[in-house]
Image: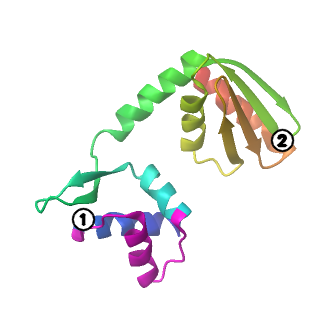
Amino acid sequence: MKASRQIRILELIKNKSIQTQEELANALKNEGYDVTQATVSRDIKELNLIKTISADGSYRYSVVSGVKQDQQDRLHKIFASTVLKVQSANNIIVLKTMQGSANTVAVVIDSLNNDDILGSVAGDDTVIIIVRSNEKVASIENLIKDLIR
C-alpha cells in the first residue's frame, strides 16, 4: 500500500501542479487512498520532495534527483561520528550524542524505516528510541552499532 501510494504521489506531482500537502492528500483521497496529513508529510519526506518555482511563479512539489543518496551518506557519517553511547532499558534505547547532534541522529534513525522502531524523540544530546518489543531491542541496538562502525 505504501509503495503504491508513493508511486502514485510521484505520478501526481509529475503531471499536476501540487502546491500543498492538503492538495496532495485530497488528490490521493480522490483516487481511493485513505491518507492523513501526517501520512502525506512522511511520504514527502521519504520521497525527498521539495517545492520548486513553476513557470507561472507558483510553488509546486518536485523530485530532487540524485541528492537523496548523497544526503543519506552524509547523515550516516555524522551519525557515526556523533553517537557516543548506546544503552537500553526494556523497550527503550537511549543514544547519547555530542551536544547539538541529537536531531540529526534522530533523522537517521527515522530514515531507517524499520517496523520495529515505533519512533524517536531528540533533545540536544540525547535520542530516545521506542522499540516495538523488548525482544527486538538487541537487533535494533546491533543495527545502530553497525551504523557507528
Residue lying at the far right in this picture: please name it: 90
Q: Residue at x 46, y 80 (%)?
A: 29
Q: Is residue 34 above or below residue 41?
A: below
Residue identified by numbered label 1: 14
Q: Is residue 36 magenta?
A: yes
> Where is residue 110 drawn, in percent x and y?
58, 43
Q: Residue at x 39, y 69 (%)?
A: 24
Q: Is residue 112 above or below residue 43?
A: above
Q: Is residue 31 visible?
A: no
Residue identified by numbered label 2: 91
The residue range painted magenta reads 15-37
Q: Earlier in the sequence, mark 1 or mark 2?
A: 1
Q: Is residue 61 above or below residue 35?
A: above
Q: Residues within 10 Å of mark 1 (few under 14, many from 20)?
A: some
| Lateral position of residue 57 relative to residue 95, left or right | left
- Numbered disc total: 2
Residue lying at the far left in this picture: please name it: 55
> Where is residue 49 drawn, in percent x and y?
35, 52
* Secondary structure under the numbered disc 1 in the rendered image: helix
| Lateral position of residue 114 relative to residue 65, left or right | right
Q: Is residue 16 magenta?
A: yes
